[in-house]
Image: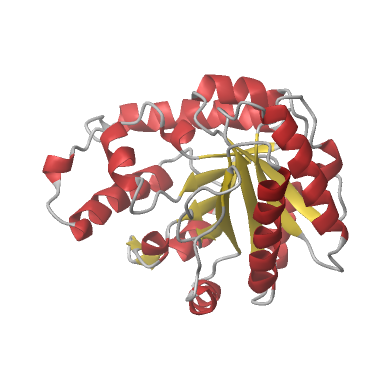
Amino acid sequence: MNTEQATQMHSGQGFIAALDQSGGSTPKALAAYGVSESEYSSEAEMFDKVHEMRTRIIKAPAFSGDKILGAILFERTMDSLIDGMPTAQFLWDVKHVVPFLKVDSGLADEANGVQILKPMPTLDSLLVRAKSAGIFGTKMRSLIKQANPEGVAAVVQQQFEVASQILSHELMPIVEPEVDINCPDKAEAEALLKAELTKHLDQLTDQKVMLKLTIPSVPDFYADLINHPNVLRVVALSGGYSRDEANQKLAENHNMIASFSRALAEGLFAQQSDEEFNQILSDSIDGIYQASIS
């Protein structure tokens, strides 16, 4: 594991840009960017369009390690090029941004108030490719919709089983058990989640993981996790909040940094001039950065 990248992720000032929309969420991401489904006629063309969007974001002047510590990529983005360089290499060598990879295959059907990860039979081969591509870490997202003790326990158990597999490849796992912001008993679900996470973190020996969590209902509720010796960093997902609302809530949680996707790209459109696009992105980055260093 790259020591300089690990240091940046542990103690750097800034946040993570999540650029990892996958097949199911790509049309929605493109539509928000002002690219309609009539502008592409195949999956390949769709992914070309989203790579153009991501390339434009990554190459923007404000997108740099000064305020952005890391970026999460989709598998096709990892396999694509920016200015003739593999994306992960471009991120680190040109922008000094640590590259991560989304490795999950989506969510299974809901059971016990949660959606666990779908099976990932080809994960080992993907991790080998990721390592050779210069990826530092990975992330995989589960979803908690109800404060169901059995369901929450199943989510965390599976997340740490996969994290162990990722650690065996000398990559840094981002454990992401998202609590739906519309969960009717969100604070209770977070209490169950915190207890399960603590139990599994305590069982790690000489290993660290990262956590990506929904901004909690009670400010600083995850302080114990942030300070846990087996946690490299705790990052927050925007979870459907607007950028302003997500920033406001995040700022109330000390030492928790952003890992925003839709909130980062809010207000960006394909039709904008480079000057307008870069200014809006710069303002977005500044706002998320300020919320992350609270």
Q: What is the number of callouts on the image?
A: 0
**Chosen colour scheme:** secondary structure
Q: Quadrant of residue 148?
A: top right
Q: Position of residue 183 (x, y in %)?
A: 59, 30
Q: Is residue 165 visible?
A: yes
Which residue is located at x 22 percent, y 52 percent?
46
Q: From this view, report whether residue 209 is shown above or below residue 181.
A: below
| Residue 210 placement, left or right of 124 | right
Which residue is located at x 59 percent, y 42 percent?
113
Nearer-the-camera pick, 150 or 2: 150
Q: Is residue 98 visible?
A: no
Nearer-the-camera pick, 47 or 155: 155
> Where the C terminus falls, by quadrant?
top right
Q: From this view, report whether residue 81 is shown above or below residue 238.
A: below
Q: Position of residue 16 (x, y in %)?
A: 58, 45
| Residue 156 placement, left or right of 92 | right
Q: Position of residue 7 (x, y in %)?
A: 74, 57
Q: Position of residue 256 (x, y in %)?
A: 72, 37
Which residue is located at x 33 percent, y 66 percent?
84
| Residue 140 placement, left or right of 39 | right
> Where the N terminus falls, by quadrant?
bottom right
Q: From this view, report whether residue 19 is shown above or below residue 258.
A: below
Which residue is located at x 63 percent, y 66 percent?
162
Nearer-the-camera pick, 183 or 294: 183
